[in-house]
Amino acid sequence: MTALSESRVPGWRAWLLTETPTSRRQARLGHAYAAWLRFRANPLAVLGLAIILALVLVAAAANIIAPHSPYEGDLANARLLPPGAGGYLLGTDDQGRDILARLIYGSRLTLTVVTLVAIIAAPLGLLIGTVAGYAGGWVDATLMRVTDIFLAFPKLVLALAFAAALGPGIANAVIAIAITSWPPYARMARAETLGMRHSDYIAAVQLMGASGWRVVLRHVMPMCLSSLIVRVTLDMSGIILTAAGLGFLGLGAQPPTPEWGAMIASGRRFILDQWWVATMPGIAIFVVSLGFNLLGDGLRDALDPKEAGR
């Protein structure tokens, strides 16, 4: 059985990597497999993927692997314990709560924020950019001027303004970050749409009687997805830092929710003597941001059509 399975492997590889696919399904699978091979050949990209997968697993199993409660602490006996003391691997904060447990549960909040922002901002920017690039004229000018207004302000400053107007809370923080995150996606989608608007492929679809909305939704937007995925992945670290900044200023998740930015804010009072209170969540933010950046760089190289022919 093992020999038979091994003998089939080259056949499957040849079927996936053939230059003359016989069906659309074979072409799609072959393109995905070739992209995976290019991605796997990049050790840093694999490291980034491993970091993100570890974050997902930690968030999913937080109830199991967290050694203590993230909300309740022993204020009388475990306040500001250093790492390793009293059975607390990363120490405790000023409320006697286990920092490791709060970091583990905080990973859930971090994943929730980046996922919701990506779900809201990426499709919005993709739709605005493709419509502007395909329609042209006054539609393009209007949508792009609105985009320019958002891009004129620093992202964090604009997110702070929206969060302050909406009020503190994680839901309002997600909305504020999403509102400030879509313009780069719109710019990217518009640029790609302008490059393909007059292509033979789009002209053939138009000759078949497809409406403008059908061309945009069914043909233009799917061709922009690979670049969008790469851009979203690279922007995840910025989203994490913006969410941490809002939490640090008290405009994100509210106590006692274990949010990494809020944990840094509460630990800055003890940074000289009890350094671990603010340092541990800072390290968590750094590692996760690095993981998303490495993953984004790897996806960019793997999904780049120019790399496929090399």
Image (tube, rainbow, N blue to C red):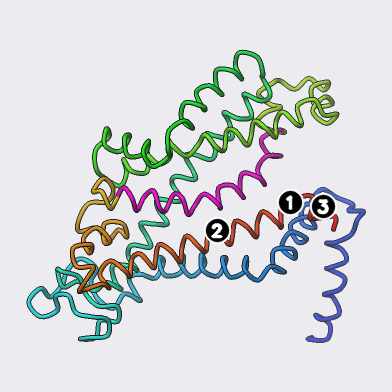
> In this view, which residue lies farthest toward the right?
20
- Dot 3 or dot 2: first in sequence order is 3
Q: Residues within 10 Å of mark 1 (few under 14, many from 20)?
A: some
Residue furthest out toward the left: 76
Q: So how many labels did they put on this image? A: 3
Q: Report which quarter residue 160 is drawn in.
A: top left
Q: Amino acid at mark 2?
A: Asn
Front tag of 3 and 1: 1
- Distance in Å between CA atoms under marks 3 and 1: 17 Å
- Residue 127 location in percent, x, y? 58, 31
Front: mark 3 or 2: 2
Q: Residue at x 84, y 82 (%)?
A: 4
Pick the residue in front: 95 or 267.
267
Look at mark 2 in the image and give the residue it sits on. 293
Left-right relation of 242 to 134: left
Residue bearing mark 3: 27
Q: Which residues are magenta?
A: 220-246
SS label for mark 3:
helix
Q: Considering the whole magenta stretch, tell me its main secondary structure.
A: helix
Q: What residue is at 34 percent from the left and 75 percent from the top?
A: 64
Taking 50 as reference, is 220 above or below it? above
User: Which residue in the protein does label 1 denote?
Assistant: 304
Above or below, 236 against 139 in this view is below
Residue 227: image x %, image y %? 66, 45
CA neighbours of label 2 inside 10 A, class few (<14), some (14 to 19), many (20+): many
- The disc, 3 or 1, on the residue closer to the chain's N-terminal end is 3
Screen quadrant of the C terminus: bottom right
